[in-house]
Image (cartoon, rainbow, N blue to C red):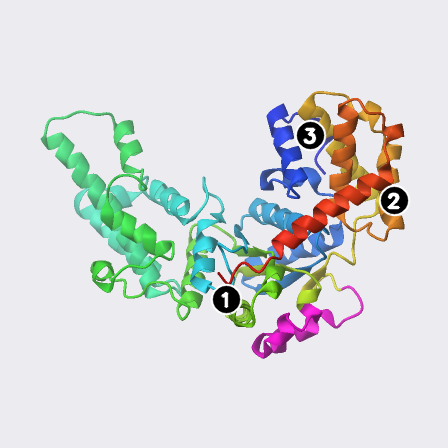
């Protein structure tokens, strides 16, 4: 648990950004650890799998099931932080109209675009830039025959990684050759022309692989991002395929092998808002479910990979859910059949393991401290623990204690009004819960609009 002192050290702008995000129903990913309370059993077993199964070469798929507002996205964000802290690369993909699960190439492109790990920045461009900067400190960057020999040796080493796709290995080799031979040529040209500049200036300029005007370099980066190019453009680099549904398994496996090669323990993929598929047309749903099946197949033939999908219970029980696609349903039908909770199982049922009243009160204290910091006032004096507890009691009476989002929205409303001078004793708490629930229902309707068909 993050200490109160750490929360109080947030800058007012950071605190206000958190509050504004919470109003919209989201928690900024960078600040998720501040709100991590409860569900320790699930997280304990997931962490155990990370260290003792996935990092040892295993693979697994889990479905995180919960109703709208139960905290699925937050739970996935906690997994995101756990994975990064333990040396895994992660990619957190939110499935939207811009990233529809029924278009696999688009999903893959977003996997590599959202990639994070032990490197600065986000995305495969940042990963490759970091790798090239590390290679610059080795013989790969040497001039003449020594550099050529080191680069050839690296190319063979990449090709010989068991399971590595030849196109992926050749693309990495071409990227290295292009970068370091061009850098050597540039430095030689500068020396020949009598111009002078510091070593640091050269390093800064030549390591900027995104904007140095090198069209071949840009083409290779475009390929790594899942972009298309002509066979004529790719042939000089001994690359003969670009991303498609058929080779996606090999390319994903090769990405994981490369991540392992440069020091990551494995890869964690998180797909949020899978439930929006239900609202789509039958043809779109079938294509989407086929891609879910494909990802499950990928995990079963991969190593060092864990995939998580967030879903609502309807995805498992509705006629428009997984059961509408036999090829997928035959793979997943057993995940929701057990009546008891299995913390090592495939289904992470957070709806059946809601935060307790005590855990919600602890979350409320954290929110109160952040709100105080945000607006520079003493919230604890006006909004006491007893009032936070009363919000929980009201939700429990309505049978919606598990809805964390509803609790957060209510409490922020109360904090806002108290900060503006209204006495909490005169607030209509029942009206607060009704208004907060109305907001959430509107958000839910908007999220589930069938927008992928267009």
User: Residue shown at 48%/54% (left/top)?
Assistant: 98
Give the percent coordinates (x, y) of residue 91. 52, 52
Under tag 1, what secondary structure?
A: loop
Of marks 2 and 1, the one in the foreground: 2
Range shown magenta: 316-341
Residue for badge 1: 302
* 70 over 340 or under it: above or below: above
Of marks 2 and 3, the one in the foreground: 2
User: Residue shown at 79%/33% (left/top)?
Assistant: 414
Residue 331 or residue 12, whichever sits in front: 12
Callout 2: few (<14), some (14-19), or many (20+) C-alpha neighbours within 10 Å?
Answer: some
Under tag 2, what secondary structure?
A: helix
* 3 over 328 or under it: above or below: above
Q: Earlier in the sequence, mark 2 or mark 3?
A: 3
143 with respect to 354 (left or right): left
- The alpha-carbon separation of the residues under discs 2 and 1 comes to 47 Å
Give the percent coordinates (x, y) of residue 102. 50, 65
* 342 over 119 or under it: above or below: below
Per the rendering, the mark at residue 64 is none
267 with respect to 415 (left or right): left
Most frequent secondary structure within the magenta stretch: helix
Tell me the quarter of the picture where residue 388 sits. Answer: top right
Q: Earlier in the sequence, mark 2 or mark 1?
A: 1
* Residue 325 magenta: yes
- The alpha-carbon separation of the residues under discs 2 and 3 comes to 27 Å
Residue 55 or residue 336, whichever sits in front: 336
Per the rendering, the mark at residue 7 is 3
Under tag 3, what secondary structure?
A: helix
Per the rendering, the mark at residue 394 is 2
């Amino acid at each position: 648990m993050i200490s109160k002192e750490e929360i109080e050290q947030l800058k007012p702008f950071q605190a206000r950004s958190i509050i504004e995000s919470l109003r919209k129903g989201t928690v900024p990913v960078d600040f998720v650890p501040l709100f991590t309370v409860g569900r320790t059993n699930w997280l304990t077993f997931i962490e155990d799998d990370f260290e003792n199964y996935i990092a040892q070469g295993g693979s697994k798929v889990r479905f995180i099931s919960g109703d709208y507002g139960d905290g699925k996205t937050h739970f996935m964000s906690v997994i995101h932080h756990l994975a990064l802290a333990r040396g895994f690369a992660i990619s957190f993909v939110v499935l939207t109209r811009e990233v529809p699960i029924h278009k696999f190439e688009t999903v893959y492109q977003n996997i590599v675009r959202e990639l994070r790990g032990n490197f600065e920045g986000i995305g495969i461009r940042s990963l490759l830039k970091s790798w090239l900067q590390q290679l610059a400190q080795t013989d790969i960057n040497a001039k003449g025959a020594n550099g050529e020999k080191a680069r050839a040796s690296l190319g063979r080493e990449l090709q010989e990684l068991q399971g590595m796709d030849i196109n992926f290995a050749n693309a990495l080799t071409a990227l290295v050759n292009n970068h370091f031979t061009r850098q050597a040529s540039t430095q030689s040209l500068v020396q020949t022309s009598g111009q002078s500049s510091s070593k640091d200036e050269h390093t800064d300029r030549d390591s900027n692989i995104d904007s140095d005007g090198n069209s071949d370099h840009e083409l290779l980066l475009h390929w790594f991002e899942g972009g298309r190019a002509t066979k004529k453009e790719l042939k000089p680099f001994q690359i003969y395929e670009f991303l498609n549904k058929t080779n996606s398994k090999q390319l994903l496996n090769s990405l994981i092998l490369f991540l392992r090669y440069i020091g990551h323990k494995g890869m964690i993929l998180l797909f949020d808002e899978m439930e929006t598929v239900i609202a789509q047309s039958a043809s779109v749903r079938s294509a989407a479910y086929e891609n879910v099946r494909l990802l499950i197949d990928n995990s079963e033939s991969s190593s060092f990979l864990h995939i998580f999908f967030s879903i609502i219970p309807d995805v498992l029980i509705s006629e428009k859910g997984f059961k509408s696609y036999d090829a997928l349903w035959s793979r997943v039908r057993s995940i929701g059949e057990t009546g008891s909770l299995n913390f090592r199982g495939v289904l992470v049922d957070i709806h059946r393991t809601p935060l307790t009243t005590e855990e919600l009160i602890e979350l409320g204290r954290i929110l109160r401290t952040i709100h105080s910091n945000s607006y520079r006032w003493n919230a604890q004096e006006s909004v006491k623990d007893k009032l936070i507890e009363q919000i929980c009691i009201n939700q429990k009476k309505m049978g919606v204690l598990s809805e964390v989002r509803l609790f957060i929205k209510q409490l922020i409303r109360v904090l806002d009004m108290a900060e503006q001078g209204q006495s909490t004793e005169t607030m209509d708490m029942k009206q607060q819960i009704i208004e907060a629930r109305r907001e959430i229902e509107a958000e839910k309707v908007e999220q589930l609009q069938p927008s992928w068909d267009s």
